Image: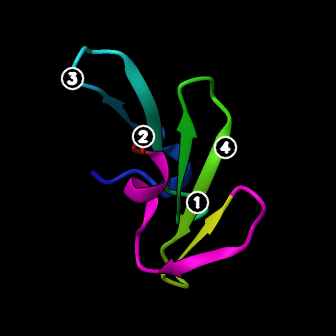
């Protein structure tokens, strides 16, 4: 039996570098249909809106269409 979206826990993916140090966390939020990316300290890096197919940065400015969160969270 499928549970309603508001009963699903947020799916969290932890991204690590070659040494195993946490670089970021990407959290899928089912109730808002968004994916949120945070850095290692937990600060918001950006969010992807599945309905609008748009990625926004910390300030809410559109970065581009599609899911560009990996480009925002990976170290340069």
* CA gap, disc 2 and disc 4: 15 Å
In the picture of the structure, the residue carrying the numbered disc 1 is 47
* CA gap, disc 2 and disc 1: 17 Å
In the drawing, what numbered circle is on residue 75? 2
* CA gap, disc 4 and disc 1: 8 Å
Count residues near mark 3 (Cα–Cα under 10 Å), then give few for <14, some for 14-19, many for 20+: few
In the drawing, what numbered circle is on residue 60? none
**Which element is circle 2 on?**
loop
Query: Which contiguous range is marked in magenta?
Result: 58-73
Does 41 sit above or below residue 11?
above
The answer to whether mark 4 and mark 1 are in CB contact below 8 A is: yes
Q: Who is closer to the viewer here, 51 or 76?
A: 76
Count residues near mark 4 (Cα–Cα under 10 Å), then give few for <14, some for 14-19, many for 20+: some
Q: Which of label 2 and label 4 is nearer to you? A: 2
Does 6 sit above or below residue 22?
below
Please state the horizontal and vertical placement of residue 63, each as a whole percent of the image: 58, 74
In the picture of the structure, the residue carrying the numbered disc 3 is 18
Extreme residue toward the front, this view = 76
Comes first in the chain, label 1 or label 3? 3
Comes first in the chain, label 2 or label 4? 4
Comes first in the chain, label 2 or label 1? 1
In the drawing, what numbered circle is on residue 44? 4
**Which element is circle 3 on?**
loop
**Which element is circle 1 on?**
strand
Extreme residue toward the right, this view = 59
The answer to whether mark 2 and mark 4 are in CB contact below 8 A is: no
Res 59 quadrant in image: bottom right
Left/right of residue 60 with respect to residue 28 in the rendered view: right
Please state the horizontal and vertical placement of residue 74, each as a whole percent of the image: 40, 44
Does 56 sit above or below residue 54?
above
**Which element is circle 4 on?**
strand
């Amino acid at each position: 039996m499928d549970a309603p979206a508001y009963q699903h826990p947020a799916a969290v993916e932890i991204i690590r570098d070659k040494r195993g140090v946490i670089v970021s966390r990407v959290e899928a939020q089912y109730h808002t249909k968004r994916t949120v990316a945070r850095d290692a300290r937990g600060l918001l890096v950006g969010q992807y809106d599945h309905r609008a197919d748009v990625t926004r940065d910390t300030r809410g400015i559109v970065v581009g269409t599609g899911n560009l969160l990996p480009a925002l969270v990976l170290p340069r």
